[in-house]
Image (cartoon, coloured by chain):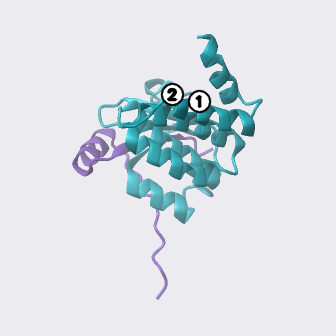
Amino acid sequence: MRDMIEVVTWRSSLEEARMEAREQHKDLLIDLFNPG
Amino acid sequence: MGANTYPDPRVSRFINEHSIPVQFNVKEDVGAPFRYHAQWTPAIMWQDVEGNEYRRSLGSLNPDQFLAEFWLAYALRYYHGGQFDRSVELFEEALEFTKYDPVRHAENLYWIGPAKYESSNGTAEDLMAGFKKLQETYPYSDWAKRSVQLKFD
């Protein structure tokens, strides 16, 4: 069986991400990108 | 980075394990560069849940550069949070990821000195030993110059 390929699950709401981070005792990684 | 760096399984695993990732497309969210004072992309920032930023990186990073950057951010978070013993462990672990990256390896070597010095059983000798290794390895680096400057301050 092939391993599942793990992808980054980007959030789009800062507030929801903050709540999630608080619950999971993690920090935030914020990425501003220009799709070109 | 979306095409090359983030799909790298080492990168995606590390991001998912250690952070909640948030992404803003600056073409759609034109206010984002102003909110974050970041007019160049990609702009990557590490923040705690209170919005305190403890590292940022501007410009594209390949997977190896990103991992080295993330490890330094991770270790510095503990150092600046006053959890020095944990930061020593993380700076030591980070060496595996920074060792082929002279810019970040020099920074990594620099911080091992202060982290050990501030740790439970740290001494001034720990600080100087860390700086000595940095000065021998990267004598012309900015971080080595900062370490030398210490004695003049």
Disc 2 target residue: B124
Which chain is painted in purple? A
Q: Residue furthest top?
A: B153
Q: Can residue B105 be seen by looking at this rendering?
A: yes
- Across and down, in percent, residue B1 comes to 60, 51
- Across and down, in percent, residue A4 comes to 45, 76
Which quadrant does the C terminus of chain B fall into?
top right
What hue represents chain B? cyan
Disc 1 target residue: B128
Q: Residue furthest bottom?
A: A1
Query: Considering only vertical position in the picture, is B133 above or below A9?
Result: above
Of B25 and B131, the residue lying toward us: B131
Near mark 1 (Cα within 10 A), the count class, few <14, some 14-19 or many ≥20, is some
- Across and down, in percent, residue B143 comes to 65, 29
Pointers 1 and 2 in contact (C-beta within 8 Å)? yes
| Badge number at residue B114 | none
Indicate the amino acid at tag 1.
Met
Q: Residue at x 57, y 27 (%)?
A: B39
Chain ID at mark 1? B
Query: Disc 1 versus disc 2: distance between alpha carbons?
Result: 6 Å
Query: Considering only vertical position in the picture, is B8 above or below B2?
Result: below
